[in-house]
Amino acid sequence: MALLPSEFANLEPFATRWSLATERERWEERVSSSIDDMQALYDAIIPEVGEAIAYCDKFPLDEMPDDAVNLLRLIYSFVMVSFAVELWRQQCPPDTLGTQFERISEPLP
Amino acid sequence: MARYPKPAAGSWTEHYPQLGTGPVSYEDSISPEWYQQEREAIFKRAWLQVGRVEQIPRTGRYFTKDISAANTSIIVVRDGDDVCAFHNVCRHRGNKLVWQDFPNEDTSGTVRQFTCKYHGWRYGLDGSCVFAQQEGEFFNLDKADYGLVPVHCDVFAGFIFVNFSEQPAQSLREFLGPMLLGVEDYPFGQMTDRYAFRVECRSNWKVFSDAFMEFYHAPVVHVGQHLSPLRAAITQMGYEAPHYQVEGAHGLVTTAGSLHRVWDMPKENVKPADLATRSGLFGPWDKSDLGELPPGINPGKVDPWGLSSFQFFPNFAILIWEAGWYNTHQFWPTSHNTLLFEGNVYSLPAKSASERVGREMAAVSFKEYSLQDANTLEATQLGLESGVIDQFPLNDQEVLVRNFHKATADWVHEYEHELAKA
């Protein structure tokens, strides 16, 4: 059973791991992933991110089908890893390992 | 050479001559005794922001808030048009009245009455005691004498404030003063998409607040948030604000919009993910239409305007951004060298997935920056606590930091003076 809309079948290999509902889960996946794995996610999504957002925009936020919600969550993970990939070349910003900054609530999806 | 004109006195700091220009002691940030004085003089006497009315939209909705600095927990509850606050303590034998699973954690919910988990005493939303278990076993008990202990509570622009004084020396509006009252007509109430953050940190609450009152640190601590070709130039350029304002204990810094216009920059200087999501630290690039903003948002008439950061003494700040969103910071001391930081990012309810993605980028950026601040401020606390140095020079971009430490000292000394008189 595909998690993503068929138009984005090429991103399907990333969906199980990265289509995560909350920032807490996405952050935990980021800090426990290698840069190579995050680079692979980033490289796969960035050419299509415009189309992916446009696809999600076809639905009202509170009536999105599950596959579109999964696609939106994958875009959120792209946002999450982009800092590690574009700036830090490591999981967390330099000199921040002594602290946490928990997101405790957020609008969904 | 200053990039923006300074006041006639020559600097923002000298524009407020009560501040002086000399080095400043940070003994106030490492002394356990001083913190005890701050608790009595400030946190039990000043108006403290505790939340927004949207958190309790209907009768019976409530939240609890632990305020360690005032050594209490409160219940804030909606009763019709009223927002009421009470100490979260059962009148029978002192049990913390409202909690869930963990007695020392905050909670929220909806009730018709508050029921004590210990012996079942019940209280109405107005705090009155309505039921005492086995009332006949007591001796001359009049429930009317056993209502919850009220806390002074008032609402400004949808922000709920409490005051632990027996009788506050000033009303909330008097306490806030004209500069802060100037934000009143901003459409806070419509901006209900909220991303909430928290961190417990090993630094004094003022040391932590300091970093959110000045942007002098930004081109250093945060320079890595820019692509590498820009970094050297950003650090070399440094930071200047076009407008500062001090009003009693409160402060304001306004930044220039030119720094925020990422979309005007050459594409090779912008992070690809920012381009892809049309968003970044300064918020979504497609501005939310909030209509005309009240002039009090930008009292320095900075043009182009970027951001106004209003510092509400003692521990709250509202930052209003050009792109049509706002965020809040709050600094709750839990000891002389630890604090709880709460951050919130608010915007209009997203109408589409693309708007949500833009807000997600802004919220993730906020976290990347805040992690850098939080860890640095633990390092600052360690340095201060070494006690090696006791005088620190503050520059003109740190004028609000200077005023903030002076204001806390003024509150402590004024309270001591009052006690001595009494």
Image (cartoon, rainbow, N blue to C red):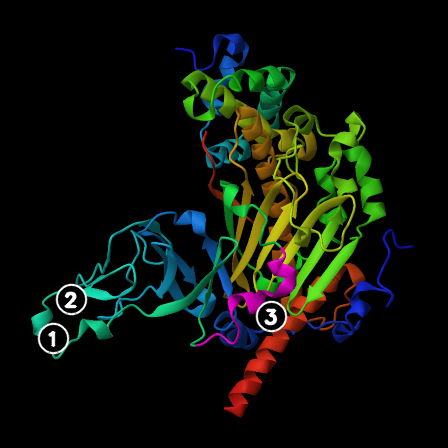
Task: Label 3, secondary structure: give it.
Answer: loop
The magenta stretch spans residue B170: yes
Query: Which chain letter matches label 2?
Result: B
The amino acid type found where label 3 is placed reads Ile
Of B312 and B80, nearer the camera is B80
Task: Label 2, secondary structure: give it.
Answer: loop
Q: Residue B138 carries which label?
A: 1
The amino acid type found where label 1 is placed reads Phe
Task: Label 1, secondary structure: give it.
Answer: loop
Looking at the image, is B126 positioned above or below residue B353? below
Separation of disc 1 and disc 2 at Cα?
9 Å
Q: Residue at x 45, y 32 (%)?
A: A108
Q: Are marks 1 and 2 in contact (CB under 8 Å)?
A: yes
The amino acid type found where label 2 is placed reads Ala
Secondary structure mostly seen in the magenta stretch: helix
Q: In this view, does B114 lie to the left or right of B410?
A: left
Residue at which label 2 appears:
B132
Query: Which chain letter matches label 3?
Result: B
Rendered location of residue B332, percent (x, y): 51, 61
Rendered location of residue B231, percent (x, y): 79, 39
Q: Residue B133 appears in which quarter of the rendering?
A: bottom left
Q: Do the residues labelled 2 and 3 touch (CB within 8 Å)?
A: no
Residue at which label 3 appears:
B30
* Sooner in the amino-acid sequence: mark 2 or mark 3: 3
Residue B26 in view in this figure: no
**Which residues fall within the magenta stretch?**
B167-182
Residue B243 in view in this figure: yes
* Sooner in the amino-acid sequence: mark 1 or mark 3: 3
Query: Which chain letter matches label 1?
Result: B
Counting labels gives 3
Separation of disc 2 and disc 3 at Cα?
46 Å
Of B402 and B154, nearer the camera is B154
